[in-house]
Image (tube, rainbow, N blue to C red):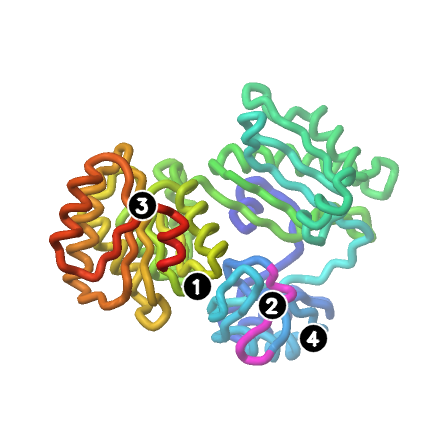
Amino acid sequence: MLVSRQLFILKVPPFGVAKTAEEARAQAERIGGKDYVIKAQVLAGGRGKGRFDSGLQGGVQVVFTPDEAMEKAKMMIGSNLITKQTDHRGKLCEEVMVCKRLFTRREYYFSITLDRNTHGPILIGSSRGGVNIEEVAATEPEAIIKVPIDMSVGVTPEIAADISTRMGFQAFLQGDCQKQAAEIILKLYQLFRNTDATLLEINPMAEDVNGNVYCMDCKLLLDTNAQFRQKELFRLKDSKQEDPLEIRAAAASLNYIRLDGNIGCMVNGAGLAMATMDIIKLHGGEPANFLDVGGGATVDQVTEAFKIITADEKKVNAILVNIFGGIMRCDVIAQGIIKATKELNLKIPIVVRLQGTKVEDAKALIATSQLRILPCDNLDEVSALS
């Protein structure tokens, strides 16, 4: 949120960031007053309902004195925060945000994202802010306002005024909250455009008892394909908050996400990867990862993929390879599998389903390798064997 405040002058609660408990107390003293909120700075949602391995419940804490801010920060910094969006290990909290606690009279939801149906940005607003918007959409779909945006026109003052009014901001209240909200929405759209964002979410956008409208919390996702245009923003990225294996996979141009299961997966194409994971679960298994090697993987990339999948040897007890060779050649996949199996001296079962380009050559390579690689053609059989 700091970047957006600096560049677009958006109103946010007074805050500071602390890397030690003593700094947290100093930030509270600087902010002044007697009500503060301490927020764990980790890249995961659901912080408020999370828990620390130190025993503290909740990654968002309300405190009333600088000394109390220091004590809560001491329990957060250096501990792992476990939320519904992290794995069982959680994420390390290395710093906290200390901000002034504002007393709000109403909270709203606002976001801008990309809509596949309209092929452009869409504004989403609701009077139900400060809660899980997915739950609101499921239980009260009528409370969600959606406004598709024509990229050639953008968000005009009229559009901003209309959606802010429909969200429930009122013009006759102290401070003219509707006007403030409309001005914020215009700035947020410019922020969305100028940063190559794929999602900008303010939850909640709130009005306080004095009639001031604030952006209370923000989520900003950037298009990684625009990194060449957004170098300054991407320099702010904290790689320590990311999974080391996911960073390693990205360096090899592999799409990898660690999961909690024990069956390693290597697939080409996101759709086939999702279907493969579904069928593993259908047969009672649990995937250990999502890994898409893409359409033009090399032998070395396939080998690196296996190294990443098997990095946690105690966790992965089988590997399932499911490849449909269109652009991707099946013999290249087979060569990579054989190379990785030999280099890593793998003893776990490897079940391979290959279809498409050069598949017969691939099967011949596997058959003559004399390695513990089980070829299958039927997807259900592949999943059952894994």
Disc 1 from disc 4: Cα separation: 44 Å
Residue appearing at x 61%, y 32% in the figure? 122
Callouts 1 and 4 close, C-beta under 8 Å: no
Residue at image position (19%, 51%) is 336
- Report the residue that reaches farthest toward the top: 152
Residue 33 image point, x, y percent:
72, 67
Residue 96 lies, in percent from the top left, at 55, 66
Q: Which residue is mark 4?
A: 65
Mark 1, mark 2: which one is toward the viewer? 1
Please count the marks in the image. 4
Q: Is residue 37 visible?
A: yes
In the image, is 225 to the left or to the right of 167?
left
Please give left or right for residue 77 compared with residue 319 in the image.
right
Which one is earlier in the sequence, the residue at label 3 or at label 1? 1
Tell me which numbered mark, 1 or 2, is placed earlier along the sequence.
2
Q: In the rendering, at what x and y percent does residue 338 appear?
A: 17, 55
Please give left or right for residue 344 compared with residue 66 in the image.
left
Mark 2 to mark 3 CA distance (whole Å): 43 Å
**Residue furthest to the right:** 172
Q: Which of the two discs, 4 and 3, sits closer to the camera?
A: 3
**Label 3 SS:** loop
Q: Image point 18% across, 40% down: which residue?
A: 360
Q: Which residue is mark 3?
A: 377
Vertical placement of residue 210 versus 98, above or below? above
Give the number of the disc on residue 50: 2
- Earlier in the chain: of badge 2 and badge 3, it is 2
- Residue density around tag 2, few if under 14, some if 14–19, many if 20 or more, within 10 Å: many
Q: Check contact, mark 4 vs mark 3: CB within 8 A.
A: no
Residue 66 occupies quadrant = bottom right
Residue bounds of the magenta highlight: 46-55
Q: Amino acid at mark 1?
A: Gly
Decide whether residue 35 is among the magenta residues.
no
